[in-house]
Amino acid sequence: MPFMKTIFIYWLLFFFPVCLLQAQSGWVRAKGSGYVQATVSYFTSDQYFGLDGTENSNASTFQSYALQWYAEHGLSDQLTIIGQGPLVKFNQLSSTKSVAGVGDIQLGVKWGLAKKWPLALSVVAEIPTDDGILFAQAKQPNELGILEQINLPTSDGEWNFRTTLALSKSNSSGNIYGSLYGSINWRTEQFSHQWQSGLELGYAPSKKWWLIAKLQLQESLSDSPRNVSFLYGEGTTFTAFGFTTFYAVNDRWKITASYFDYTDVIVGINNLYNGPTFSLGAALEY
């Protein structure tokens, strides 16, 4: 899809009522305030789409479990530090045993550029936790009697630098908001750079309960991605959607549940297992 046409569609979606997705927001934290969240997630799928977008009918089922963290803290009224990543992640195919590792860690800062229409610029570095090699052993020997090994890394083994510009707006009563963002992920080790954008719409039917709808798109900035494991995200493109709900137990503690899935409505699916992710978590706001 041509770049300008893609941008036009994103803005069209933002200014008309649609189901949107969680995205980076234009708000920053007040000085000394913060937010910490822990989440468990589960993904499974037997629908693998290759680099050319063709589904592999013989693909093994892929499963992934993760315990993840997210945190942000206001250093000033205009500067927030942010971080996130899996504490532990388990990957396996139906034909292999499970392997476990620590996922890549993301650390960065977000600057508040405007307040009337909250606008923020963030720069985040994704730090690899290993060399991107983690072999899972096959459950059964092949025709030669050999137990094969398949690389199912929990880290892609390379540094990423993501720059994001996000715009948000809420209504006067504060129970409805919308956000729009666009970002470029600069990758190292000769991996393809990526363009990502997203939309989010939130509605609070009560003071304790939030409902959030999400839309996210990713495109590769290379026409010749490397042919490597799908877990490196090389040449991966998609349209994704999801729904999240937050419930405030009290002024500080919240519980959250999320559903996230893929479609090819706007951007086609390439080099990706297409399936849902379910998440449950708890959060502390201070």
Image: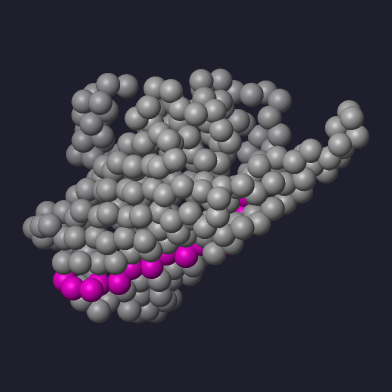
179 above or below 231?
below
Q: Quadrant of the C terminus?
A: bottom left
Please identify the residue farthest to the right as the structure is shown. Answer: 145
Horizontal arrangement in the rendering, residue 7 relative to residue 91 (left or right): left
Answer yes or no: is residue 56 visible. yes
Write the start and end of the magenta stretch as one range: 64-77
Q: Is residue 38 left or right of residue 182?
A: right
The main secondary structure of the magenta stretch is: strand
Left or right of 273? Residue 189 is left
Is residue 25 positioned above or below 17 on the image?
A: below
Residue found at x 52% / y 46%: 156
Residue 48, position as x, y percentages in the image: 60, 30
Q: Is residue 208 visible?
A: no
**Front-most of residues 115 and 254:** 115
The spot of residue 282 in percent (x, y) is 48, 69
Residue 70 covered by magenta stretch? yes
As for residue 192 lying within the magenta part, the answer is no
**Residue sitting at 38 percent across and 31 percent down?**
220
Q: Residue at x 40, y 75 (%)?
A: 284
Q: Position of residue 155 (x, y in %)?
A: 54, 51
Residue 105 occupies quadrant: bottom left
